[in-house]
Image (tube, helix red, strand yellow):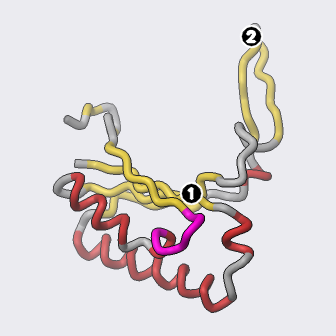
């Protein structure tokens, strides 16, 4: 089964961390990625740029309208994700618990099943 493990970031929480704590998060993600690669469960992972670099596109009539900035105004934002292929929901939750962000109050790690992947329904 495929699962999206998304990382929700609160800049205020990150800003309050020491340099050592931030480095430990980075190191923890590196180790987590290596573990997922070794187990064959990692499909892909991406880190996203800050929401200030986002643009929202909508179509009104036939003309696209582009607005700078994130879609929603919120203190938290999607910072990145891991797409994994693992045995079941319990394994996906166990993997998510290994992500360093899960141990920091104010940061979020969310696990959601993938409904379809590359045109194929995931049942």
Tell me what residue is drawn at x 39 percent, y 51 percent.
4
Tell me what residue is drawn at x 42 percent, y 59 percent.
82
Tell me what residue is drawn at x 72 percent, y 77 percent.
16
Q: Is residue 72 magenta?
A: no
Tell me what residue is drawn at x 78 percent, y 15 percent.
63
Q: Quadrant of residue 98?
A: bottom left
Q: Quadrant of residue 93?
A: bottom left
Q: Which residue is mark 1?
A: 8
Judged by its main secondary structure, the magenta piece is: loop
Q: Nearer the viewer, residue 98 or 32?
A: 98
Q: Which residue is mark 2?
A: 62
Question: Is tag 2's residue or tag 1's residue first in the polypeptide sequence?
Answer: 1
In magenta, the rendered stretch is 102-107
Q: Nearer the viewer, residue 113 or 76?
A: 76
Q: Is residue 74 above or below residue 15?
A: above
Task: Give neighbour class at mark 1: few <14, some 14-19, many 20+ (Cα, 10 Å).
Answer: some
């Amino acid at each position: 089964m495929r699962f999206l493990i998304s990382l929700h970031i609160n800049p205020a929480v990150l800003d309050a961390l020491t340099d050592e704590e931030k480095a430990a998060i980075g190191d923890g993600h590196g180790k987590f990625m290596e573990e997922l690669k070794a187990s064959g469960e990692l499909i892909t992972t991406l880190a996203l740029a800050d929401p200030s670099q986002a643009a929202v596109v909508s179509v009104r009539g036939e003309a696209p309208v582009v607005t700078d900035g994130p879609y929603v105004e919120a203190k938290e934002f999607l910072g990145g994700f891991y797409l994994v292929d693992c045995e079941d929901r319990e394994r996906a939750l166990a993997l998510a618990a290994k992500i360093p962000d899960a141990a920091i109050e104010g940061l979020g790690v969310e696990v959601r099943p993938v409904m379809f992947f590359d045109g194929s329904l995931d049942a």
